[in-house]
Image: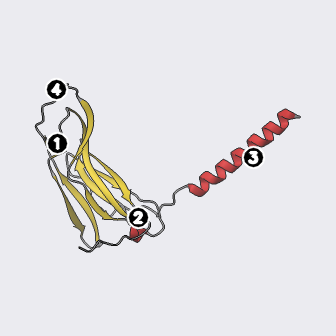
Amino acid sequence: MKFSKLVITGLVMMVGVNTFAQKKAEKFEKLEIEMFPKAKEGYKQVYIQLPVAKNEQDLKVEFFVGTEKMLDCNNYFLMGSVKSQDLQGWGYNYYEVESNGETAGTLMACLDKKMTKKFVYIKPEITRYNSKLPLVFYVPKDLEVRYRVLRPDTAMKKAVQR
């Protein structure tokens, strides 16, 4: 008797968790990137597809183009640039990244000489959140694109008058 109650309780909990997971599943618009050009030699095309969100007009996306490297205690950045290009005839844009993978950074003395794996990146950029369009990038094959979604505070704050 106890065993059957335990099995039934377990099944009910599994169904509840599964239902909750389905409700929390992110919804995406149909992805269409065929109209974007193919990547040139030595480059790859990568994209970010954002899920449908409430109040998308309040959200922003910050993206980072970089690579992981073994580095010392100094602060580093990846040398290069990200340029927004217009997809002719569509009104969409995409990003072309130019970088040879070189890094620059501070020149602090690192006493412990310890090397750590760090993600170094070109100056990050912020763009508007739009689940209807993918963010398309053309990056050198040895780089990657990471991103995070920026959300506003719940309430506006008032500036202090001097």
Give the crowd class for mark 4: few <14, some 14-19, many >=20 residues within 10 Å. Answer: few
Residue holding disc 3 = 12
At mark 1, the secondary structure is loop
Dot placed on the residue nearer the N-terminal end, 1 or 4: 1
Residue 70 — which label? none
Residue 4 as seen in the image, left or right of residue 75? right
Q: Are marks 3 and 4 in contact (CB under 8 Å)?
A: no
* Residue type of the residue flagged with mark 4: Leu
Front residue of this view, candidates 101 and 74: 74
Mark 3–mark 4 Cα distance, whole angstroms, equals 58 Å
Residue 101 — which label? 1
Dot placed on the residue nearer the N-terminal end, 1 or 3: 3
x, y percentage for residue 140? 21, 46
x, y percentage for residue 158? 34, 72
* Residue type of the residue flagged with mark 3: Val
Dot placed on the residue nearer the N-terminal end, 3 or 2: 3
Residue at 12% x, 41% y is 106
At mark 4, the secondary structure is loop
Give the crowd class for mark 1: few <14, some 14-19, many >=20 residues within 10 Å. Answer: some
x, y percentage for residue 146? 32, 49
**Which of the two discs, 1 and 3, sits closer to the camera?**
3
Mark 3–mark 2 Cα distance, whole angstroms, equals 38 Å
Dot placed on the residue nearer the N-terminal end, 2 or 1: 1
**Which of the two discs, 3 and 2, sits closer to the camera?**
2
Residue 132 as seen in the image, left or right of residue 65? right
Dot placed on the residue nearer the N-terminal end, 4 or 2: 4
Residue holding disc 2 = 153
Residue 111 — which label? 4
At mark 2, the secondary structure is loop
* Residue type of the residue flagged with mark 2: Asp
